[in-house]
Image (cartoon, grey):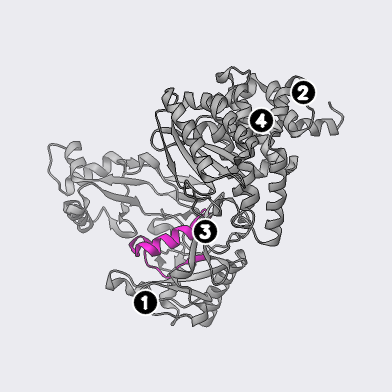
């Protein structure tokens, strides 16, 4: 038997049964309930909530009917079916984002919410808020889809596509008045034109005229069906083309028989339950929404925005900012400082400086303005401004761990500035990617990641021909850098770099321990991998001019070099090295 796969994507199983639930036999309803219980078992940590809304078109209400198969419901503009405890209001929902996906969180239930719809309404026609809830809930799931021709979709003639015993796409033709006029300029649209088109493109007798999911079976050997096709081509709705699919199986190949042996065409809708899906990331922990503190220029923090081109930024950091800020720390005026490179839209440095206990705001602001005026006066910067500073507590673990994580910002800036002279374009001996790789691996190692955890915690990299070439030509140096950083087999020739890479080690270790403890105790906002991924991103930002493509290449180098180290260690364990 040959199975034919209709075009389109899969959707949540059981949706076609909903409007018939009151006339289905008990066994069918039991099967439907079993299907949804399997869905619940796949996400035991989450709340599965049915989305209920009225369609914009009244005639679509018949496909909005469905039984309530979940304990929870989100109602937009319709009557509720679930009891009061099971209703989730929009006011109770928050939107979160992890390293891999977006998700919904219910403050009242303190659980993730997955929104589904078990009716047949087209979500593309739903209210915007409904579409958003469904889209966010679908993030992290990959639904199988039918075969697509990509850019060839809509071509004049496309062949049948078969994989083993499954027809992924039937042979398809796209026909229009314009096409027929171009093929047969000597003849107007008529049954004779259709016959010539069939002969030219080998169109079979039995076909479907298709308009999305609406299909009309035509026998092109029958004059009435040919006239119907001509009529369809005359319809302005098909001026760009009408899709014609071959009928599969043909009438003599159908398998469904009646009591008298007569053949019937049939379509099956089969619910499927995945048994080997990739596990979802661990449940997120979200505390109360942090409003965040706001620090004005005369408060605990002073926030300087200094506009300078990307080349000058490196020199300013090495020759001016780091030296001046560390001097202020030694003088007891400043407790900590950190910098960020930015394009908004012009390149600039953002310098955030924390006043030390005992120092006055006037002291700090006066010295910061003096520094900025000096740089502008010597044309190292074009202009500057002072802005309020709002710490990103939610991004870095929430209020419980943020004060400790914030200490790594100062350490990260000192580390980045110490590594600048090692960069090739700053007079050093290493490429930007090599220094970036060493810095990222140092951060993760100091954070407390074991060699086995490094690859899992590192952000996903992006391969490129340039980085593959670098791996081939500089493999020995890259491996030496990685071994020096991770402590596997330090290279004495890299001692100076190793000393620089240890700057901030204590702060990173302390923050890593605090985040792991908060994660175990359920106090961490967001997830651990996202947090350290943000720290890695900001370290690369402080070290190198902004280039997200290069940053992804650096992560790729990290993954590849770690893979090489694991292979070497395995060879040593087997006595091969």
Q: Which mark identifies residue 491?
A: 2
Q: Earlier in the sequence, mark 1 or mark 2?
A: 1
Query: How many numbered marks have been drawn onto this rendered protein structure?
Result: 4
Within 10 angstroms of label 1, few (less than 14), some, or many (20 or more) residues? few
Q: CA distance from mark 4 to mark 2?
A: 13 Å
Of the two numbered discs 2 and 3 in the rendering, the one whose residue sits closer to the viewer: 2
Instruction: Identify residue for label 3.
Output: 103
Percent x, y for residue 390? 49, 50
**Residue at (58%, 44%) from the top-left corner?**
359
| Magenta stretch in the rendered image | 114-142
**Residue at (62%, 26%) from the top-left corner?**
434
**Residue at (35%, 60%) from the top-left corner?**
124
Q: Nearer the viewer, residue 471 or 326?
A: 326
Q: CA distance from mark 2 to mark 3?
A: 45 Å
Within 10 angstroms of label 2, few (less than 14), some, or many (20 or more) residues? some
Instruction: Identify residue for label 4.
Output: 438
Instruction: Identify residue for label 1.
Output: 78
Q: CA distance from mark 1 to mark 2?
A: 69 Å
Image-based side of 123 in relation to 427, left or right: left
Q: Are marks 1 and 3 in contact (CB under 8 Å)?
A: no
Q: Earlier in the sequence, mark 1 or mark 4?
A: 1
Percent x, y for residue 375? 46, 27
């Amino acid at each position: 038997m040959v199975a034919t796969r209709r075009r389109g994507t899969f959707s949540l199983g059981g949706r076609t049964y909903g409007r018939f639930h009151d006339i289905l036999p008990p066994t069918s309803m039991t099967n439907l309930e079993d299907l949804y219980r399997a869905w619940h078992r796949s996400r035991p940590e989450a709340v599965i909530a049915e989305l209920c809304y009225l369609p914009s078109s009244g005639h679509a209400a018949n496909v909005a009917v469905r039984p309530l198969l979940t304990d929870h419901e989100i109602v937009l503009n319709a009557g509720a079916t679930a009891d009061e405890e099971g209703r989730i209001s929009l006011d109770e929902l928050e939107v979160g984002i992890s390293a891999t996906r977006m998700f919904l969180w219910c403050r009242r239930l303190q659980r993730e919410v997955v929104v589904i719809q078990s009716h047949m309404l087209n979500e593309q026609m739903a209210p915007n808020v409904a579409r958003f809830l469904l889209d966010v809930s679908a993030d992290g799931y990959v639904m199988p889809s039918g075969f697509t021709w990509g850019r060839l979709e809509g071509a004049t003639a496309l062949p049948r596509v078969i994989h083993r015993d499954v027809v992924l796409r039937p042979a398809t033709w796209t026909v229009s008045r314009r096409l027929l006029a171009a093929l047969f300029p000597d003849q107007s649209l008529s049954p004779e034109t259709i016959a010539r088109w069939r002969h030219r493109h080998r169109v079979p007798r039995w076909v479907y005229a298709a308009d999305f999911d609406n299909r009309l079976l035509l026998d092109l050997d029958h004059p009435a069906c040919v006239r119907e096709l001509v009529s369809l081509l005359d319809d302005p709705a098909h001026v760009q083309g009408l899709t014609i699919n071959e009928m599969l199986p043909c009438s003599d190949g159908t398998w469904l028989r009646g009591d008298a042996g007569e053949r019937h065409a049939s379509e099956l809708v089969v619910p499927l339950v995945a048994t080997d899906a990739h596990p979802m990331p661990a449940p997120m922990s979200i505390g109360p929404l942090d409003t965040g503190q706001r620090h004005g220029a005369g408060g605990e923090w002073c926030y300087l925005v200094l506009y300078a081109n990307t080349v000058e930024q490196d020199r300013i950091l090495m020759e001016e900012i780091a030296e001046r800020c560390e001097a202020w720390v030694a003088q007891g005026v400043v407790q900590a400082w950190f910098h960020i490179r930015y394009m908004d839209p012009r390149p600039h440095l953002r310098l955030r400086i924390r006043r030390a206990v005992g120092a006055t705001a006037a002291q700090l602001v006066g010295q910061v303005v003096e520094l900025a005026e000096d740089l502008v006066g010597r044309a190292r910067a074009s202009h500057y401004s002072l802005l309020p500073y709002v710490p990103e507590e939610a991004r870095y673990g929430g209020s419980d761990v943020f004060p400790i994580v914030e200490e790594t910002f100062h350490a990260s800036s000192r580390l980045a500035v110490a590594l600048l002279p090692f960069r090739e374009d700053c007079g050093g001996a290493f490429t930007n990617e090599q220094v970036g790789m060493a810095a990222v691996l140092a951060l993760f190692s100091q954070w407390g990641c074991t060699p086995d955890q490094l690859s899992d915690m590192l952000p996903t990299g992006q391969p490129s021909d340039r980085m593959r070439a670098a791996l081939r030509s500089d493999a020995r140096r890259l491996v030496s850098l990685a071994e020096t950083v991770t402590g596997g087999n330090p290279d004495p020739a890299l001692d100076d770099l190793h000393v620089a890479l240890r700057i901030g080690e204590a702060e990173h270790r302390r923050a890593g321990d605090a985040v792991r403890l908060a994660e175990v105790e359920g106090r961490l906002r967001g997830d651990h991998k996202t947090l350290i991924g943000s720290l890695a991103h900001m370290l690369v930002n402080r070290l190198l001019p902004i280039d997200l493509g290069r940053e992804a290449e650096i992560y790729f180098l990290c993954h590849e070099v770690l893979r090489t180290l694991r292979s070497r260690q395995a060879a040593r364990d087997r006595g091969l090295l």
